[in-house]
Image (cartoon, grey):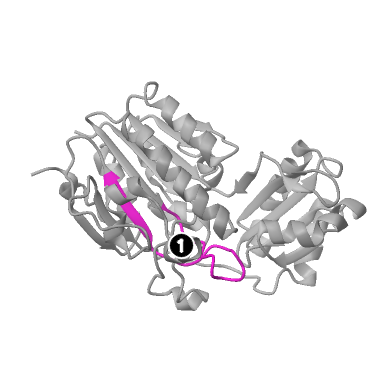
Amino acid sequence: MIKRVILLVVDGLGVGATEDASAYGDGTSHTLAHLAESAGGLSLPTLESLGLGHVSAIRGVRSMAQPMGCFGRMGFISKGVDSLVGYWEIAGCLTEEEGRTFPQGYSTEARAALENVFGHKIVGGQVASAQEALKEFGSAHLSTKSPLVWTDGRQTCHVAAHEQVWSVDVLYQRCRDARKALKDAWGMRRLVAHPIVGTAGTLTFRDGRRDFAGEPPGPTMLDVLNRASQILTGVGKVGDLFGGRGLTRSVLAARWTAALDEVVGMFNKVPRGLIFAGLDVIGADAGNAAAALQDFDRRLPELLDHLRPGDLFIVTGDHGRDPSKSHALPTRECVPLLITGPKLAQGVNLNMRSTAADLGQTVVEALKGDALTVGESFLDVLRPG
C-alpha cells in the first residue's frame, strides 16, 4: 500500500522534442543530450541507476541492465510551454488554449497596460532570459528607476527591481496586482518577481523570486487529495504555481538546494500524503546547468536512503530548456519519468505516456483519491509481481 508520494519536478529536464514541438519552433530540442554534448558528457550515476539511460541516449549516461526503478517518458498535450502549463498538466489539469503570445516582445499597447498598472514607465519588454535582460537593461533600470520587464514570448511576464527602485514587498504587491489586472485583457497568466541587488556593472538576482499565477482552471490532484484528507506539502514554487489551492502547507525555498533540504527534513515529519517539490536546477547557462544537474544527482542518494516501505518516489520535469537554442527559454519537450520505492517493481518500462496527466492520475490512485477527469493511471505496473 502506498502511504506517501515524494514528487520532484526538475525545471527544464527535457529529453527530446514532443510530436508537436515544431509548432513551437522546438522540433530539434533535446535538453539533456545537448547539455551532455556541451559538457563532454554528464555524470549522473543515480539517475542512471533509476533508468535514465533507457529513456534517451545521453552522452555519459549508461543504459543499466537492471535499473532500480521504473522508467519512461511523458509528453504534454496542453497548449503552451512553461512551468505553469507543465505543473498543471502533471496535476491533471489541461490548458486548452495557449492564449496570446508575444514572439516579438511586448507591443506598445501591452507596454502601456503594464505601465498603467505599475504607475511607472518600464525598461525592457523584449523576449529574453533573465540574465540577458539584466545584462542589457540593468544599467537603465538603475538610472531611470523604472521596473525591468521581459517576457518568455508567451504568457509569463517577468518583472525585476532593485531595492533602490522598489522594496521587495512593493515588487511582490505590484506583480500580484498586475497579474490580476492583465490576465484577461492580455493573457499574462503569470507574473514573476525577481529582486535585484548590487551596483551598476555588478547587478545580480538575489534570493526571493516569487511566481504570481492564477488558480488552475479545473480540478487538480491537489484538490482531489485534499478532499481525501491527505497531507499535501508544496516545496519551492509549487504553492505559487497553484495559488496555494489544495495544499496543507506551502514552503518557499530560495534555491533548489534549499528545497531538497526541506524535503529531507520532511521525511520524519510528514508520514503520509504528498510531498511535491519544484526544483529550478537547469538554468540558461549550459555550463552551470550541467554542473547543477550533476550536483542534483549527487544529492539524490540522501533522499533515497530515507525511503521506507509505502513510499513512492518520482523524478520528472515540466518542460525542456535546450541550451542549443538562442533564447534560453522553455522548450516543448518530453520529460523523463523515473519512479522507485521499497517493495515496488524495478526495471519496468513505462513507455511513452502521451500526457503528463497520467502521472497525476497515478498519484491520486496511489493515495486513494477520486479519479481525475484526464489521465490514465499506471499504478498497477508499479506493483511487484
- How busy is the neighbourhood of tag 1: few (under 14 within 10 Å), some, or many (20 plus)? few
- What residue occupies the far left of the structure in this picture? 385
- What residue occupies the far top of the structure in this picture? 269
Tell me, yes or no, if residue 169 can be seen here. yes
Q: Report which residue position mark 1 lands on.
A: 40
Up-down relation of residue 313 to residue 53 (above or below): above
Looking at the picture, which amino acid does disc 1 mark? Answer: Gly
Number of residue marks: 1
Up-down relation of residue 137 to residue 227 (above or below): below
Q: Residue at left 38%, top 42%?
A: 7
Task: Name the residue nearer the viewer: 93 or 315.
Answer: 315
Q: Residue at left 56%, top 57%?
A: 287
Residue 300 location, x and y as percent? Answer: 38, 39
Up-down relation of residue 348 to residue 266 (above or below): below
Going by the image, does 276 lie left or right of 168? Answer: left
Instruction: Please state, as top left, top right, bottom left or bottom right, where the C terminus lies in the image.
Output: top left
- What residue occupies the far right of the structure in this picture? 143
Task: Name the residue nearer the viewer: 290 or 347.
Answer: 290
Q: Is residue 338 magenta?
A: yes
Up-down relation of residue 190 to residue 237 (above or below): below
Residue 90 location, x and y as percent? Answer: 39, 52
Residue 1 location, x and y as percent? Answer: 19, 33
Q: Is residue 244 magenta?
A: no
Q: Main secondary structure of the magenta part?
A: loop
Going by the image, does 147 lie left or right of 333? Answer: right
- Which stretch appears magenta? 317-339
Tell me, yes or no, if residue 248 can be seen here. no
Residue 3 location, x and y as percent? Answer: 26, 31
